Amino acid sequence: MIPAPTLEDRAMGALIGAFIGDALALGPHWYYDLDQLHADHGPWISDYTTPKPGRYHAGMQAGQLSQSGILLRLTVQSLVDCAGYDEADFCRRLDDELFPLLDGTPMNGPGGYTSQSIREAWRLRVKSALPWGQVGGNADTTEAAERTLGIAIRYALQPAQLAAAVSQNTALTQTDGTVVAMTVAFGAVLGMLVEGHKLDAAISPKLMARVKSGELPFHTVTSGNLQAPQAGQPEAPTAGRFPSPDALLSQSSIALAATDPDIHIDPAWKVSLVYGMPCAVYHHFESAVLHAINGGGQNQSRAILAGALTGAQTGLSGIPQRFIDGLENSAALLDLAGRLAKQMVA
């Protein structure tokens, strides 16, 4: 019987899984025509691929990180060097290490493409010389959810600090309340998986218990198990920063659907045709990440997020070695992941 992964193994698996998911999607990123995806990369993508000329990330090589992975690495390096989330240090790194390499256009910058939220922050910060805290925009992408994976891992055992740090970091570039709420919710789920909870039907009630205890800043008036509140029951002293906990409730439904024999999507990657391929936030490790990238569309977001979730469950020990071997600078990324994991259990 294979032993359950340790806390450190789960933390490292979540981070390395995210890097792997990001790099796997580099070549087949943003194909909304699945026939063209298959013509360029074959019927089933099973490993790292080099982007085709004229496509997103053209000029990069198989196994390299996109800008999402680079931002995640930057965030984790700040966490490790500062022994926790230090907003001033994070912002300094963006000013010194990323923004000088950008020009405000999409098809430019480290990783071969710069997302809308980073472009908007660059324009306000560099061109308009606005201070941090005034450069966030309304982009509805998952960009912040991807870079804050490292924060969620670091504070997996401290959910209140996780929520505070993730929301603060997200608001630097994305200020829409729904985007911030869903980013915090995703971080909270990842934190629970790193902590050792299962992604099953019980995950949402566990998250709601943390809302009730004040650890997660979501508003709720229901009684236990989402039942109606008692008549005359006073509202909680702190109503929560986010207006609704709905972003914490779908995880249990998804887990139930995945095990329901009456719900069947074959092949699994075609779920992207059901839920959509866009970039917006509201829409076994190898199997999870490969189905994520083979679905087309914004498969990079799906793959980096799925890689983190599944890596947290399997642990680093459950990730196929070929994915680690093919990841550029994997030794340095493994060292970074190990340092982050050791800090969270110190």
Image (cartoon, rainbow, N blue to C red):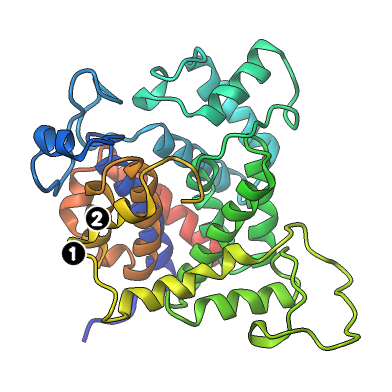
Q: CA distance from mark 1 to mark 2?
A: 7 Å
Residue 194, percent across and down?
A: 46, 68
Residue placed under numbered mark 1 in the picture:
266
Q: Is residue 9 left or right of residue 119?
A: left
Mark 1, other Cα within 10 Å: few <14 / some 14–19 / many ≥20: few
Along the viewing direction, whichever of 316 and 213 lies nearer the viewer:
213
| Residue under the image location 62 percent in, 25 percent down | 121
| Residue under the image location 66 percent in, 79 percent down | 209
Dividing the picture into quadrants, the one containing residue 254 is bottom left
- Give the residue type at disc 2: Lys
Residue placed under numbered mark 2 in the picture:
270
- Give the residue type at disc 1: Asp
- For label 1, the SS is loop
Dividing the picture into quadrants, the one containing residue 287 is bottom left
Q: Quadrant of the N terminus?
A: bottom left
Residue 192, percent across and down?
A: 52, 70
- For label 2, the SS is helix
- Tag 1 near tag 2, CB within 8 Å: yes
Vertical arrangement, residue 166 with respect to residue 7, above or below? above
